[in-house]
Image: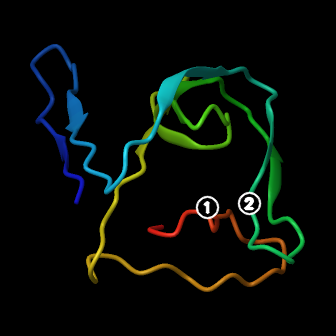
């Protein structure tokens, strides 16, 4: 199970965010840079139409999983918003069912432990 933390802001306003990455299998990662204007598209389960599509209003730098720029495991955009994909098994989180109405952001259905 992954762990995420955020420290109280320092007197100069600096914020430190950290995480552990404890997935049950190794995920090959590399540094990824997505420019402002990047066209994104959510993943859909097999046999379903693709989910939400968007055009990025901010650039993003982060860690890309499996060489796929859509699979950021961690990242931060040019506005300072960060995200972290945390593995939370055994009831620590729940996932919404795929609706298929264009509002789904996506998930990685091909990974058996996901």
The image position of residue 30, as x and y in percent, is 51, 23
Query: Relative to residue 32, is residue 2 depicted above or below?
Result: below
Judging by the rendered image, the residue that carries numbered circle 1 is 108
Tell me the residue at 11%/22% (across/down): 10
The one nearer the camera, 8 or 44, is 44
Could you classify mark 1 by the number of other residues whose Cα lies within 10 Å: few (under 14), some (14-19), or many (20 or more)?
few
- Badge 2 marks a residue whose secondary structure is loop
Labels 2 and 1 touching (C-beta < 8 A): yes
Q: Earlier in the sequence, mark 2 or mark 1?
A: 2
Judging by the rendered image, the residue that carries numbered circle 2 is 43
The quadrant in which residue 110 appears is bottom right
* Alpha carbon distance from label 2 to label 1: 7 Å
Tell me the residue at 76%/68% (across/down): 44
- Badge 1 marks a residue whose secondary structure is loop
Left or right, 83 with reference to 19: right
The image position of residue 3, as x and y in percent, is 19, 51
Say whether residue 79 is visible. no
């Amino acid at each position: 199970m992954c762990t995420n933390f955020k420290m109280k802001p320092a007197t100069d306003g600096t914020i430190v965010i950290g995480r552990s990455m404890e997935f049950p299998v190794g995920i090959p990662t590399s540094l990824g840079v997505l420019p402002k204007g990047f066209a994104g598209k959510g993943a859909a389960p097999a046999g379903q139409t693709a989910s939400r599509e968007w055009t990025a209003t901010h650039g993003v730098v982060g860690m890309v999983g499996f060489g796929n720029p859509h699979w950021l495991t961690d990242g931060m955009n040019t506005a300072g918003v960060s995200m972290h994909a945390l593995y939370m098994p055994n009831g620590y989180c729940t996932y919404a069912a795929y609706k298929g109405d264009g509002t789904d952001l996506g998930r990685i259905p091909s990974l058996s432990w996901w």
